[in-house]
Amino acid sequence: YDYNEKYRPAYHFSPQYGWMNDPNGMVYYNGEYHLFFQSNPYGSRWANMHWGHAISSNLVKWEYKPTSLAPDSIGSIFSGSAVVDKNNTAGFGKDAIVAIYTSAGALQTQSLAYSLDKGRTFTKYEHNPVLSDPKIADFRDPKVFWHQKTNQWIMSLATSQTITFYGSKNLKQWNKLSEFGEGIGNHDGVWECPDLFPLKYNGQLKWVLLVSINPGGPNGGSATQYFIGDFDGKSFNPDMTIPYPVWLDYGRDNYAGVTWNNIPDADGRRLFIGWMNNWDYANFVPTLNFRSAMTLPRELKLANNGKHVVLANYPVHELESLRSETVLLENISTDKEFVIEKLLNVNNGAYELEMEVDVLESEEFVLELQNKSKEHLDFIFDLKNETLNVDRSKSGIVDINEKFASVVSKAPLTKKDKYKIRLFIDSASSELFIDEGAVTQTNIMFPGEPYNSLLIKNKGKVLKINNIKIHKLK
Ligand code: FRU
């Protein structure tokens, strides 16, 4: 394996060898975070879907494990989830880790596999599949959790352009509870990878439903929309004060993300990871021995963006342990342009920028990362039009296919006096978080060399930046 291959990320999860797409089966058990993923162990384009596997004790450092699930006579192994069966409801054994995944053959059906050795090896259930419906071609990506109140397992399943909820006492027999999605949200593509989970907001319990869609994303290709509402153990009722569709991330490259099951109550966090790519061009990104990386692990919270409730997503605090050296610049005021010629003395392309901006009377300001070859990646805070645009058209290799560079990603940005900005750069990715993740833009890019200078441009009257911190990341 060539870990030094160009565009191999420094601090994002990427497969050791071969192709990777969706994160799968994320579950926490016995001090370990499991990450399974859609994997082609034989090549670096989408084919032969298996579940690859990695384990971490801290969400920062991952250890590769052998492939967990391989194709069989009823199909290849598509996306799905995993649960810890504490009460042995399925009869595979107490505390079995049970994977619920899609068998993709002539039909898409749902299957089970279980592990009695802390996720190291899996045995497929002998009577697979456990759920099928020959009338629906796109019938996949089961996400299962235990619903205490109604004392049953709930499965969210993508069924063409709706999400269907099923209930079960034993993970083996499933009955349909309800269907959600007609006439609401975006329907320009097929619905995939649902996830339903509770989150507290102002002391109240709310339910969030993630739905990935391809195509139909706000900036083209694949993206993840969400709904906020209530769930009573049978059906999901969306809160209609939210201007649907709304998106988890307005960048081009955060897809098929779902959350970890079984995070201990004492921790109480809802942890998420997404696939940092887009079906518009995923098979053609310029790497050789591996393809794709995951987003940073993020914590999800409900927040207010100044206009309505949003699903904020923000890097987990564990990632602060990656900081190896910090440069601090204070009190920068500019009415036109300000340049930081050298962000880091030795820059290998892995760093984080943090800053607080007082907008004062600026109408638009731009953060432009540049390298010596004059490639640049632009973050445009258009305060007049209340949009945050990311322009990667001159960011490096962009002729991957016609869809890669053509679109400037736009996100809604409520006009405020101050913004708190965090930007994570790795060898082939940028993740921008405004105000603790109330606005997020994740976009990949392929510069010839790391960006090591920052040009800040301002339109309008003075802009003040209190504190720029540049953290080099291990
Ligand atoms: C989403 C997806 C899923 C499917 C998997 C196949 O990216 O299309 O719906 O299970 O990828 O690899």
Image (cartoon, rainbow, N blue to C red):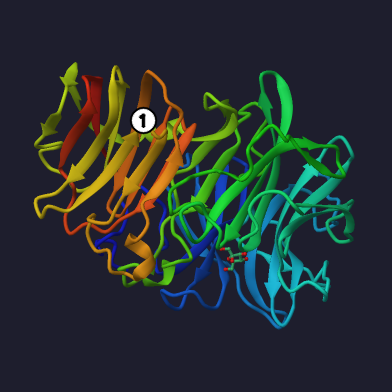
Residue 95, image x, y percentages: 75, 48
Q: Is residue 257 visible?
A: no
Q: Amino acid at mark 1?
A: Leu
Q: Is residue 443 left or right of residue 106?
A: left
Give the crowd class for mark 1: few <14, some 14-19, many >=20 residues within 10 Å: some
Residue located at (71% from left, 70% from top):
138
Residue 177, image x, y percentages: 88, 52
**Front-most of 265 and 349?**
349
**Front-most of 38 and 123?**
38
Name the quadrant of the C terminus: top left
**For residue 1, what is the image quadrant?**
bottom left
Q: Is residue 309 left or right of residue 364?
A: right
* Mark 1 beta carbon near ligand 1 (under 8 Å): no
**For residue 146, what is the image quadrant?**
top right
Residue located at (46% from left, 35% from top):
439
Residue 206, image x, y percentages: 72, 31
Secondary element under disc 1, as helix, strand or loop, is: loop
Quadrant where ligand 1 appears = bottom right
Where 205 falls versus 238 (above or below)? above
**For residue 116, what is the image quadrant?**
bottom right
Residue 411, image x, y percentages: 44, 41
**Front-most of 37 and 373?**
373
Q: Is residue 398 left or right of residue 101?
A: left
Which residue position is annotated with label 1?
383
